[in-house]
Amino acid sequence: MKQVYVAGDKYTKAKAAKQILEAIEDIENISLRDVLDRNRPYNGQPWTNDGERGQTMVRGLTMRDVYDCLILAFYYSAPPNYDRNCPLEDLPLAEMSLEAICQNLGCWLERYMGIFPNIPERLR
């Protein structure tokens, strides 16, 4: 089987595909009950909101900053060929990934706090 290079390690395509499918399954299994449990562990991949990165406290931002970051997350989650100068209501929400919006929100919050990319040094 052909080897592919992913995140610093060699994997077979089958192993990489299995890991991707497991990650998708984890995303699809998120429920309101899970999100409301603020005491759940940060046991995800270190660079995700469910891992070390997710433990970061949001500091020094106004509510308007958070709102702006959310709007930016929507625009940056739109398909690459989409006009970012259009009104927010015109974004193709059906073509956008909810997980991408969440990931982009975290990245924009980090940018506004001046800590992007907020991932452990060993993973950079």
Image (tube, rainbow, N blue to C red):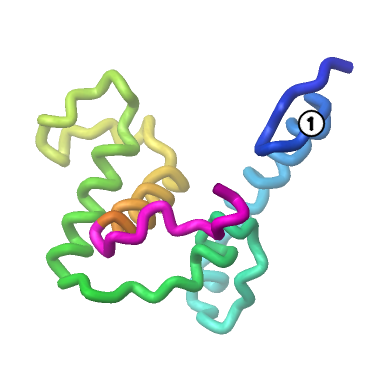
Quadrant housing residue 34: bottom right
- Residue under label 1: 10
Q: Is residue 10 left or right of residue 111?
A: right
Disc 1, SS: strand
* Residue 33, image quadrant: bottom right
Horizontal side, residue 62 vs residue 55: left or right: left
Q: Residues within 10 Å of mark 1 (few under 14, many from 20)?
A: few
- Is residue 122 shown above or below 82? below
- Magenta segment: 112-124
Residue drawn at x 81%, y 21% as measured from the top left: 3
Image quarter for residue 18?
top right
Q: Position of residue 26 (x, y in %)?
A: 65, 53
Outermost residue toward the right in this view: 1
At horizontal 33% and vertical 73% (from top left) the residue drawn is 58
- The three-letter amino acid code for the residue at tag 1 is Lys
Marker count (numbered): 1
| 93 part of magenta stretch | no
Q: Main secondary structure of the magenta part?
A: loop
Left or right placement of residue 31 versus residue 86 in this view: right
Name the residue: 74% across, 41% down: 19
What is the x, y in percent for residue 87?
A: 10, 36
